[in-house]
């Protein structure tokens, strides 16, 4: 009992720290005319968990209009944040939907989103659609913008599709949302997914839970699943995306370039993905030396996931 109470207190303390950082960012962006939408964390807490929220969320997630990304970057830099991993640092050059930021000596990382995972319309169009599905929530004495109920239901399913079954807290969010939201909300979320051309990811996320699978059938959601959606929903082993990028690259030169980036990625990528690489210079060297063995260990499971995703995609 005392241990459980201690866990709840630590979670509450962590939420306060994250919420304070989120409020700081929302206020700083708003001061220069940049509108932002707070994702997950307090937004999921408001709509899904309510006053009984006992989660410990770790980071601050903000969605901004693509046209404001450069200005938002300048704001974060002004607040002492550094970009942790640039899109160009991904060894397979896979397009990402968010930028990761961190402030030295500060425990709360920040993800700056340009769109939602799974949305296949241009990011600017997605912002216009999503901005119509918002409301205001008070976060640490700052009025912040969050998604409304329908967009939150959509986001929960898209987030599940992004992480598959590899993140237990994401699965808990999905289960809680399926319990909390009624049929009308999910129907509205499905219509929103259609406008964003995100139906494949939305359906894949729902189908990761038994209740969601039944709901997807009720809503008559298509079972068509592009390869990338099928792969993510499987929670593939490390390197699966990179192996696929090498295999599908055009020309021997391009394949060789990607293979070299896979074996010897940028320092920022190594430090972002490997705890060993974050242990000073020697740790970084050790991480590079061990990388071929790490990739070799993951190769067979990664190929297995690629084959399974290929069979499931249509």
Image (cartoon, rainbow, N blue to C red):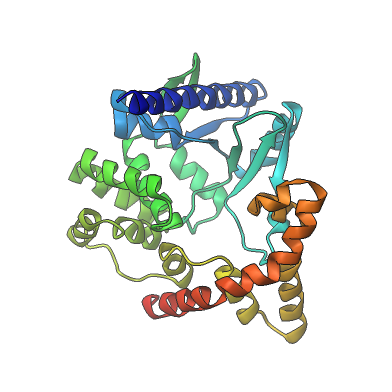
Residue 228's place in the image compared with 300, above or below, is above
Task: Look at 55% across and 32% down and name the residue there.
Answer: 36
Q: Is residue 244 left or right of residue 148?
A: right
Whole-percent x, y for residue 303 in the image = 51, 78
Task: Look at 36% across and 27% down and name the residue there.
Answer: 3
The C terminus lies in which quarter of the figure? bottom left
Residue 290 visible, this orientation: yes
Residue 93 picture quarter: bottom right
Residue 135 picture quarter: top left
Residue 134 visible, this orientation: no
Task: Look at 38% across and 49% down and name the residue there.
Answer: 168
Q: What residue occupies the far right of the structure in this picture?
A: 281
The one nearer the camera, 209 or 36, is 209
Whole-percent x, y for residue 287 in the image = 72, 59
Q: Is residue 174 left or right of residue 140?
A: left
Q: Is residue 295 left or right of residue 104?
A: left
Whole-percent x, y for residue 139 in the image = 47, 20
The one nearer the camera, 261 or 148, is 261
Residue 93's place in the image compared with 39, above or below, is below
The N terminus lies in which quarter of the figure? top left
Q: Is residue 78 left or right of residue 65?
A: right
Q: What residue occupies the far front of the structure in this picture?
A: 2
Residue 108's place in the image compared with 65, above or below, is above
Q: What residue occupies the far top of the structure in this picture?
A: 141
Whole-percent x, y for residue 150 in the image = 32, 41
């Amino acid at each position: 009992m005392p241990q459980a109470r201690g866990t709840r207190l630590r979670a509450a303390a962590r939420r306060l720290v994250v919420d304070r950082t989120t409020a700081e960012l929302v206020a700083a962006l708003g001061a220069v005319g940049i509108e932002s939408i707070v994702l997950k964390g307090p937004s999921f807490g408001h709509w899904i968990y309510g006053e009984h929220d006992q989660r410990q969320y770790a980071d601050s997630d903000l969605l901004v209009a693509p046209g404001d990304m450069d200005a938002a970057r300048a704001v974060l830099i002004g607040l002492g944040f550094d970009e942790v991993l640039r899109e160009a640092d991904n060894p397979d050059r896979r397009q990402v939907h968010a930028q990761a930021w961190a402030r030295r000596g500060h425990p709360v990382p920040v993800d700056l989103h340009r769109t939602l995972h799974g949305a296949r319309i241009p990011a600017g169009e997605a912002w216009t659609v999503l901005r119509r599905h918002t409301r205001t929530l008070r976060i640490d004495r700052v009025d912040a913008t969050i998604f409304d109920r329908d967009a939150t239901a959509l986001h929960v399913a898209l987030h599940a599709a992004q992480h598959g079954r590899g993140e237990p807290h994401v699965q808990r969010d999905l289960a809680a949302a399926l319990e909390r939201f009624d049929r009308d909300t999910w129907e509205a979320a499905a219509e929103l997914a259609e406008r964003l051309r995100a139906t494949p990811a939305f359906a894949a996320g729902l189908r990761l839970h038994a209740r969601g699978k039944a709901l997807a059938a009720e809503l008559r959601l298509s079972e068509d699943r592009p390869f990338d959606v099928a792969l993510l929903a499987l929670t593939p082993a490390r390197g699966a995306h990179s192996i696929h990028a090498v295999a599908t690259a055009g020309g021997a030169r391009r394949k060789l370039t990607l293979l070299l980036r896979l074996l010897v990625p940028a320092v920022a990528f190594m430090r972002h993905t490997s705890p060993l690489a974050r242990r000073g210079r020697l740790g970084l060297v050790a991480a590079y030396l061990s990388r071929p063995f790490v990739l070799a260990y993951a190769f067979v499971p990664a190929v297995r996931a690629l084959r399974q995703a290929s069979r499931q995609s249509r």
